[in-house]
Amino acid sequence: MLHSATMLPAFLLLFFMGTSIRLTETMGRDERNKLRNQVVEMFDHAYQNYMDHAYPADELMPLTCRGRVRGLEPSRGDIDDALGKFSLTLIDTLDTLALLNKTVEFEEAVRRVLKDVRLDNDIVVSVFETNIRVLGGLLGGHSMAIMLKESGQMLWYQNELLHMAKDLGLRLLPAFNTSSGLPYPRVNLRYGVRGPETRTGTETDTCTACAGTIILEFAALSRFTGDPTFEVHARRALDFLWEKRQRNSNLVGTTINIHSGEWVRRDSGVGAGIDSYYEYLMKAYILLGDDQYLHRFNTHYASIMKYISQPPLLLDVHIHKPLLPARTWMDSLLAFFPGLQVLKGDIRPAIETHEMLYQVTKKHNFLPEAFTTDFRVHWAQHPLRPEFAESTYFLYKATRDPYYLEVGRTVLENLNRFARVPCGFAAMKDVRTGSHEDRMDSFFLAEMFKYLFLLFAEEEDLLFNVEDYIFTTEAHLLPLSLSTASNSQPPPVVNSMAGEELDDSNFEWTCPNTRLLFPDPAFPRNLREPIRSAVDKSCLRPTIHREPGMGRPPLRAQDFMANNPEHLELLRRMGVSLIHLKDGRVQLVQHATQAVSAVAAEDGMRFMQEMMELSSQQQKEQLPPRAVQIVSHPFFGRVVLTAGPAQFGMDLSKSSSGVRGFVTVAEPYNGCSELSNGEIVAGRIALLQRGQCMFAEKARHIQKAGAIGGIVIDDNEGSSSDTAPLFQMAGDGRSTDDVTLPLLFLFHKEGNILLEALKEYKEVEVLLSDKARDREAIFKGTALPGTLLDGSTDGAEEDDSSTEEKDHSCSTSSEPVDQSQDTTQELTAEDSVVGQDLVQPVEGLGSNVPVDVGEESAVDSDSGRQSTDSLIADWQEDLEAFKQMEKDEL
């Protein structure tokens, strides 16, 4: 929830709003006035229904035409923490009334707040929501009342709203009584956070945005009142978050322990849980003029663009492993980010991400609460969030491109067509079906109508110059004059910065001149077109002439071969580049400007779209991980290695007993040519090294030699399933029906377990299956090796009888072959010098390291056992580490 106009701190003048180039207007003034008036009519419909059917309740229930009173309606969980029996919607709407020129209604609303609203209720509320909605609403209302008083209206006003704001601020302060300075997530408005009567104060975790979205309101309160207490506490919380950032990636997690400062959730993005933390760093600098806030924002922003931004997508990553995606979907709250990028002056990625969001909006009428990287619905709700309208307004202000007026028209029309009901506007329960939810959140009136009104209004339509204010995350107006106001105390010095000089490389003192950014009025359109094609998969391909060298049909994703130099050259011409990752993979990334022509760029975008579609097809039948279980002496089924499956060959899930056999190393080890030790491989499971050729080619060579299965071991030294997602191996773009044996994939660390065991014990037998098998099932009625007396029987020999019962039946697979990750513009293929196998991540894995699935084995006198025990001890440590990582991801 972002807004700002031209900002004037002590040392910075953001002037891009005033110098933006005016493109040819395609929407006439009369049409804009009509849309502006329609916005006002829609606001009246929502506000009047709240006042008629809900006030003094906190919110309107538009389907049943009554107010939502906490305790009288069924609990909705954390959502209800925003409700404090303080007429939330009225307070949140105060400065919207003033902005929309409804001065009579504004004055009446202020009188109602002063007469009716109580802030000392015995009720537990969210510190974050109460701060941005209620405290922000009171301060925004105070700012508007002062503005009107200075213009000769509301002369009776004597800072009453400010007095209420200070009262509320004092009621929120007990939440900050922690050793870290991070606030408790909830506070009792009457009793604070300590003592049984508060019914709160036992929480240990809070979200980053919850603790980091306080500074604007608290600093404004301090500077309006001259009491520094509020700004000091808000700054202390921000300082602590900065100290706890991950120092290598310079990213922050989503949830933090308010006492220890440990990250509880280590995923990092720009959406829910973190969003307004970044927004408030930038705006704190603008409002307060403190260079450290800009330094912090720019440091974070550089990491966001390095790890999270994959234009036009914004995908969460792990703060300790920023190259590892944390999820394959995006939430709608990140729609504010293009607006923040405009404020930063980074226009190009703002245009790209906004266009992606617009196409998703057109596809579903609204932005779903979450959607996948191939733009399918992940969470179907839409509570009438304003973030997309906010970014639309910012982009129009920065570019004056009339395209964004049409985007605003779409938003307005969809609200009227799909969300409007007789008693207001109802949230969408499911954007796919158009069903409603009995809910109209206060932020709908506080934000949505501000941005839409400002989008269509002319300067003369406004009572005041909006450029003189900064808008909070809830779109409340705070005057920029506060930047010169004193809080009666200098801000505290942050320990980590004491004695340090600020790095000037992290500062950008001016915003770019958009006349240089957009010398061609068609430039923004050229950025949008490929993204529109990617989201709208039904678009037709125009008939166009191709430049020399591109006369042939474009490369299709299903034909792409990573080891084909001609294909790699075609990718280069289409602006698709290969980025080598540390884990042995490469990423396919397209930048349209690097293509040899506009036509080639379009081909590149279509190629990436096809890769995404192939991935989507494959994900519908996502293959689960497989198991490699060592069943020979001295392991006897206790060690299980989690393996990645292949999209071809025998389907182990359809085999009741799996494939069991002794392993041997193929020669050549990479399996890329006919085997020289075929007579040894025959009837065994071949061990192969990843690299140099396609997976299917390896499978064909060992199958020709008579192998009953194959295990591919990663050639990237140090790779491990506890630090990287497992893969499912793709084919080679041709039919793989001829491959009938099972092929599994192990990372280097897990594969080394097998190689070390083979080195020590010469004969190692494994079971390839869809999951680890019970030892009794493996040994089929014979005495379990773990129960034998030492020396009574040779475990290896005892296993021989069961090897005759191996299931060698095979089933073929002709499932769609996928050679890409499920993202429109960043797709993963296999790294190689010549061109290698293509792989896919496997989700939903259990333990990715060896686990003990049986009882303790008898003591073995074999001297070689010592090193194996040492290996197992190391593996158990890795298992604990992986469990912690898995917990983080959940």
Image: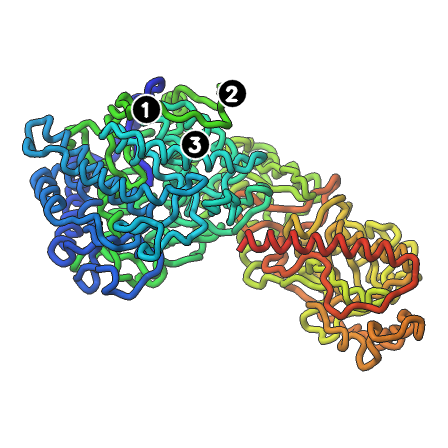
* Residue drawn at 28 percent across, 23 percent down: 486
Q: Is residue 600 visible?
A: no
Task: Determine whether the residue tagged by mark 1 lies in a helix, strand or loop.
Answer: loop
Q: Residue at x 36, y 35 (%)?
A: 233
| Res 83 → quadrant | bottom left
- The alpha-carbon separation of the residues under discs 2 and 1 comes to 22 Å
Provide the residue designation for mark 3. Answer: 348
Q: Position of residue 617 (x, y in %)?
A: 55, 59
Q: Indicate left or right for 301 with 96 as reference.
A: right
Q: Is residue 150 above or below residue 393?
A: above
Nearest to viewer (mark 3 / mark 1):
1
Q: Which residue is mark 2?
A: 500
Q: Earlier in the sequence, mark 2 or mark 1?
A: 1
Disc with the residue nearer the chain's start (3 vs 1): 3
Instruction: Specify the amino acid type for callout 1.
Output: Gln
Amino acid marked by disc 2: Glu
Marks 3 and 2, Cα distance to the nearest angstrom? Answer: 33 Å
> Mark 3 to mark 1: distance in Å?
40 Å
Quadrant location of residue 1? top left
Q: Residue 183: give x, y in percent of width and height.
A: 39, 43
C-beta proximity under 8 Å, tags 3 and 1: no
Depicted 494 relative to depicted 740: above or below: above
In the depicted view, which residue is nearer to us: 531 or 210?
210
> Residue 489's mark?
1
In this rendered view, identify the residue nearer to me: 246 or 438.
246
Task: Describe the element under mark 3 as helix, strand or loop.
Answer: helix
Residue 13 position by quadrant = top left
Horizontal arrangement in the rendering, residue 17 relative to residue 165 (left or right): right
Q: Secondary structure at mark 2?
A: loop
